[in-house]
Image: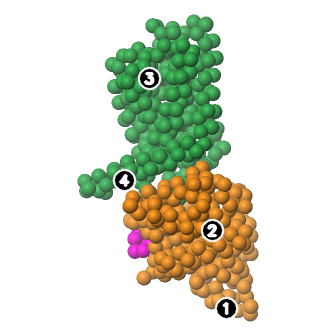
Chain colours: A green, B orange
């Protein structure tokens, strides 16, 4: 593992096998796309009901933007994170059925098994992005759509989905059963969402929450998406993408080390 | 040459010793039944052999590769069929095999031919494009054997391969396993609770009890050792383990076994 050739071999194997696994996950989705439709409901409710209602109240300061505009990136982020955070549950289900054991016994690098899941969560996340975009257009919400902004949105959605998939797989390796995972999944998703800039700006938060929000990767997703989708400003986007890329890479390495323990 | 060599293998979980220094060898092309009551250490042993669990002590080699230090060579040398359902019901038969072909780096030029051959061998050609969740129990198990054999491993390890199958499906699975051994000289290592099955198909069996190998040999040898005339393998099992065949598994194991049976049935 120490010679440069061995490292190159490991990395090329990892990339190749990640692609194979992500492709198979995507095929599953294509065989049965009903899931995509049922997942569309939640963001539509948030935008169509919560967003519409709150924008009439005008209680939340969103300088230069309508409230509906303000929360579009937040709702997109939320729906991507909700998809990703339950990937650990799939790992537990794969363990219960034996699919996981079979994959772990193949000579596939552990990192590829994690990246495969991360990419597949990203693909599901992109389908959410498409739904949110379309629904925002239907509601007449003004978005900034250019080739560059779409490309940026794809990158951020993939990275964010990857991070929370990795986190979810680590949780799965600790809690090990579906029931406990369901409980934990519920407990962490809403606080992550509320302790971020998804539906209100960080500036109106109490001090301690500001601190939490500023280390919450979800805030970096929202921040980057908001710049790309609304203001067209790309100044801070590089920083957001950089932070997400680094934490997602670290998360994938940690996850590759942790999650095979789910079978023990 | 022996394909599976186990030497003084130990696994402890805290103060509990699950596998207590076992040693045995399985030869090339041998069909080897691995028996023992629940909690005897069978699953732990298998998990170590398939590189999912690191031993606390001792070692094992598969096709000459050390399970601790050379796990990636071991993984290429074995095929594994878990007790539970390990084919993906939401993919087609063809896709399930293609997944394995690509994960095992079977060259692109050979993949399609290898998969076609396997499907025809398993008599599943007509179902290549069907989602596996529409398959019967016997078809599912055959698919799993197919997935595990696509890269032509030296040793095939199966965890209770016929639990939950009806006798017809069971016979069909074993016929295919015999044929694979004939064709590729594959060593077949399997665990089971079914003594009749073990007696019928195995060249040799090992009985594990409380982390140790209580007996090893051909079914006939084990029966003779009981000293009873007309002893069955089940009698020998009870003789060596002091234990009736019983359902002592914990809740999770039982639930799993039931689920597997439900799905296969």
Q: Could you tell me residue B265's position as x and y percent?
A: 72, 61
Q: Nearer the viewer, mark 2 or mark 1?
A: 2
Query: Disc 3 is attached to a residue of which chain?
Result: A
Q: Chain of mark 4?
A: A
What secondary structure prevails in the magenta region? Answer: strand
Name which residue lies at 49% across and 21% down: A73
**Measured from the top left, where is residue A256 in percent x and y?**
44, 48
Which of the numbered marks, if any, corresponds to residue B161? 2
Residue that mark 3 sits on: A225
- Disc marking residue A13: 4
> On what subunit does the disc labeled 2 rest?
B
On the same chain, marks 2 and 1? The answer is yes
Mark pair 4, 2: CA separation: 31 Å
- Start and end of the magenta stretch? B59-66
Mark sitting on residue B224: 1
Q: Earlier in the sequence, mark 3 or mark 4?
A: 4
Question: Residue B151's image quarter?
Answer: bottom left
Q: With B30 as the anchor, is B1 left or right in this view?
A: left
Do discs 3 and 4 share a chain?
Answer: yes
Measured Cα–Cα span from mark 1 to mark 3: 75 Å
Circle 2: element type = loop
Determine crowd level at label 2: few under 14, some 14-19, many 20+ residues with C-alpha closer than 10 A.
many
Q: Chain of mark 1?
A: B
Q: Earlier in the sequence, mark 2 or mark 1?
A: 2
**Residue B200 seen in the current view:** yes
Q: Secondary structure at mark 3?
A: helix
């Amino acid at each position: 593992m120490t010679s440069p050739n061995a490292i190159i071999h490991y990395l090329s194997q990892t990339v190749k096998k990640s692609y194979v696994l992500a492709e198979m996950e995507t095929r599953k989705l294509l065989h049965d796309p009903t899931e995509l439709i049922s997942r569309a409901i939640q963001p539509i409710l948030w935008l169509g009901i919560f967003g519409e209602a709150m924008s009439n109240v005008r209680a939340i300061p969103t300088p230069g933007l309508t409230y509906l505009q303000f929360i579009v990136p937040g709702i997109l982020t939320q729906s991507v994170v909700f998809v990703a955070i339950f990937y650990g549950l799939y790992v537990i289900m794969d363990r219960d059925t034996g699919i996981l054991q079979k994959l772990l016994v193949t000579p596939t690098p552990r990192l590829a098994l994690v990246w495969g899941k991360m990419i597949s969560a990203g693909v599901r996340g992109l389908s959410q992005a498409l739904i949110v975009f379309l629904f925002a257009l239907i509601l007449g919400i003004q978005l900034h759509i250019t080739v560059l902004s779409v490309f940026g949105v794809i990158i951020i959605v993939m990275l964010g989905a990857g991070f929370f998939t990795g986190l979810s797989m680590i949780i799965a390796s600790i809690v090990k059963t579906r029931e406990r995972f369901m409980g934990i999944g519920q407990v962490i998703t809403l606080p992550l969402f509320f302790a971020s800039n998804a539906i209100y700006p960080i500036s109106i938060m109490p001090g301690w929450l500001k601190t939490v929000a500023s280390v919450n990767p979800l805030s970096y997703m929202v921040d980057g998406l908001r710049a790309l989708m609304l203001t067209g400003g790309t100044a801070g986007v590089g920083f957001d993408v950089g932070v997400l890329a680094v934490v997602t890479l670290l998360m994938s390495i940690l996850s590759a080390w942790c999650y095979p323990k789910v079978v023990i | 040459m022996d394909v599976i060599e186990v030497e003084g293998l130990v696994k402890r979980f805290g103060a509990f010793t699950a596998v207590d220094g076992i040693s045995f060898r399985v030869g090339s092309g041998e069909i080897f039944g691995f028996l023992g009551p629940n909690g005897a250490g069978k699953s732990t042993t298998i998990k170590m052999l398939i590189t999912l669990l690191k031993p606390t002590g001792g070692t094992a080699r598969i096709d000459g590769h050390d399970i601790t230090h050379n796990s990636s060579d071991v993984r290429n040398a074995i095929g594994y069929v878990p007790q539970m359902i390990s084919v993906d019901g939401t993919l087609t038969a063809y896709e399930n095999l293609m997944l394995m072909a690509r994960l095992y780096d079977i060259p692109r030029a050979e993949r399609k031919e290898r998969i076609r051959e396997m499907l025809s061998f398993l008599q599943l050609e007509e179902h290549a494009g069907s989602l596996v969740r529409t398959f019967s129990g016997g078809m599912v198990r055959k698919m799993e054997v197919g997935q595990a054999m696509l890269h032509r491993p030296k040793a095939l390890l199966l965890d209770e391969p016929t639990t939950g199958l009806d006798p017809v499906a069971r016979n069909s699975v074993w016929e295919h396993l015999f044929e694979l051994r004939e064709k590729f000289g594959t060593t077949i290592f399997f665990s089971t609770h079914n003594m009749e099955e073990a007696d019928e198909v195995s060249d040799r069996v090992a009985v594990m009890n409380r982390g140790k190998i209580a007996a090893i040999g051909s079914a006939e040898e084990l029966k003779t050792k009981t000293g009873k005339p007309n002893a069955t393998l089940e009698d020998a099992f009870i003789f060596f383990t002091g234990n009736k065949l019983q359902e002592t598994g914990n809740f999770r194991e039982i639930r799993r076994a039931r689920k597997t049976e439900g799905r296969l049935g």
